[in-house]
Image: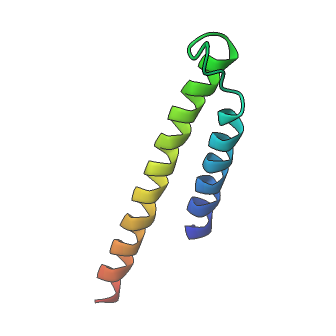
Amino acid sequence: MKYTFYLIGILAVASIVFNVFKLDFNHFLQGDSQVAAISILAALCVVALMGIMIVSKKISQKYEDN
């Protein structure tokens, strides 16, 4: 299960990198650039959630060992 969290996090980072190249800084919230900006925000949320899941999994394993 741990590897699944890492895989999802890596895919989210790859999505961020892909969408950064689609941004048009002159027209930031219009057309494809708007979709890219929203996708970057969503992927950042996924990265944060996967980080929380990994930390919570480590904490639960620590309490199971005791």
Total number of numbered labels?
Answer: 0
Residue 11, horizontal then vertical, whole percent: 67, 50
Q: Answer with the quarter of the image where residue 19 lies.
A: top right
Give the residue at x 51% y 50%: 47
Q: Residue at x 62, y 41 (%)?
A: 16
**Figure check: 44 above or below 61:** above
Which is nearer the eye, 6 or 16? 16
Above or below residue 29? Residue 6 is below
- The correct choice, above or below, for 49 with respect to 29 in the image is below
Task: Give the residue at the far bottom of this rendering.
Answer: 66
**Whole-percent x and y of residue 52?**
39, 57
Most foreground residue, 66 or 28: 28
Q: Locate residue 2 relative to residue 61 in the image: left or right.
A: right
> Whole-percent x and y of residue 46?
51, 45
Q: How is the image coloured?
A: rainbow
Which residue is painted at 67% across and 43% down in the image?
17
Residue pictured at 36% horizontal, 65% vertical: 56
Q: Quadrant of residue 23?
A: top right
Quarter the N terminus occupies: bottom right
Depth check, front residue: 31 or 2:
31
Q: Locate the C terminus and report the quarter of the image it occupies.
A: bottom left
